Amino acid sequence: MASTISERIVDDLVAGGIDFVTTVPCKQLAGVIDVIEKDDRVFHIPSNKEDEGMGLCAGAYMGGKRPCIIMQNTAIGVTINTLATLIQYYHIPLPMLISYRGELGEPVACQVEMAVHTKPLLAQMGIPTFHFHKDSDVEELGEILKYTQMCKKPTAILTDASFWKGY
Amino acid sequence: MIRSDVLKSIIPVITDELVICNIGLPSQELYMLDDQPSNFYMLGTMGLSSSIGLGLALAQPEKVIAIDGDGSVLTNFGTLPTIANNVADNFVLLIIDNGSYGSTGDQPTYAGLKTSLTAVAEACGCENVVECQAEDTAAELKKALESNQMTIIVCKCESGNIPVKVIEMDPVVIRDRFMKEVARRGA
């Protein structure tokens, strides 16, 4: 049994066939990134920028892997073009595990500036979006991963401060 | 030699290899010169040829050549440290450096001015970086493929374009055809 929420998430990713993960760090995702880095079941490649990471994921997918990107919600602002012209255009399944900064409990005012745009941008892009707020929301992760492979789209899993129990 | 001459000269070397080709004119030229299921054409997303190529090389054992341009590498500079620190010995990055943004009207890039992509790649930690003149590209590419070591080739060529048609193939067809070719080789 996974003893932490981060371990549970990584176990679910592996169970969902994810074997290639790229990350751009967020303080809130530090635990998950740490577990992934130590887990031999997943190839972990840190990216310098999230659009670069999506390129790595697209290549890995074409090589037979099931990729996932882990990033902060600010990255939605960075990756709109890549999502539209690479991931969506070529029908590449890509679950995006995203820290949803700027929600209740946020100490950094600037994070709210992208938080208010996060869901509208995802909606505008037609990206299926799931919001983990309560502990039990994580139980949907397995189904979200299946759904992502089924529809061959990018999907967004927003994880907020309430889900992570603060910062 | 301009980029299309370089591409023409390397066709015998790359025709049987998995190739990720940069957006715009490079993909259109390769499509016109030697369309193959083993070619993946980028129809959008400037800058990501090297990233897609590295991801593919890390995911499976076949050799992968990513054809990129100086402007695209400048757009996605973060790719060079990622490549340097995640060595895939089945990966060759060929940067066709004509010192200009060819697909958008030949505006000069900084790579054609003071900035050396060869020096940048080396500074990023890439171990086998070769700078060559356009006419030596095919030989250097062949050598890189035979070396079984990850290699970055910076090919210095002249700026200029030939008239080519846009690629009308559907992106999902390009991707599916390419993935079936990758899977066939792995079978």
Image (cartoon, coloured by chain):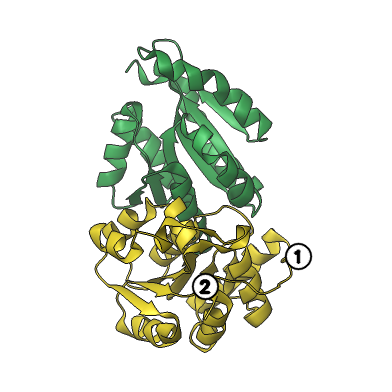
Chain colours: A green, B yellow
Picture coordinates of residue A67, whole percent (x, y): 47, 50
Q: What residue type is labelled 1?
A: Glu
Which corner quadrant holds the N terminus of chain A?
top left
Q: Determine the CA span between mark 1 and mark 2.
A: 19 Å
The disc at residue B168 is 1
The disc at residue B62 is none
Q: Is residue B79 left or right of residue A141?
A: left
B64 is higher (above) or lower (below) than B135: above
Residue at 27% across / 72% down in the picture? B128
Q: Is residue B13 left or right of residue B4?
A: left
Q: Which amino acid does label 2 sit on?
A: Val
Secondary structure beneath label 2: strand
Q: Mark 2 points at which residue?
A: B19
Q: Which chain carries label 2?
A: B
Which corner quadrant holds the C terminus of chain A?
top left
Q: Is residue A107 left or right of residue B43?
A: left
Picture coordinates of residue A73, whole percent (x, y): 47, 29
Quadrant of the image occupied by residue B148: bottom left
Q: Nearer the viewer, residue A148 or B29?
A: B29
Picture coordinates of residue A125, whole percent (x, y): 65, 35
Residue at 49% across / 53% down in the picture? A55
Secondary structure beneath label 1: loop
A143 is higher (above) or lower (below) than B178: above
Q: Earlier in the sequence, mark 1 or mark 2?
A: 2
B3 is higher (above) or lower (below) than A108: below
Q: Mark 1 lies on which chain?
A: B
Task: Answer whether residue A2 is visible to the viewer in this image.
Answer: no
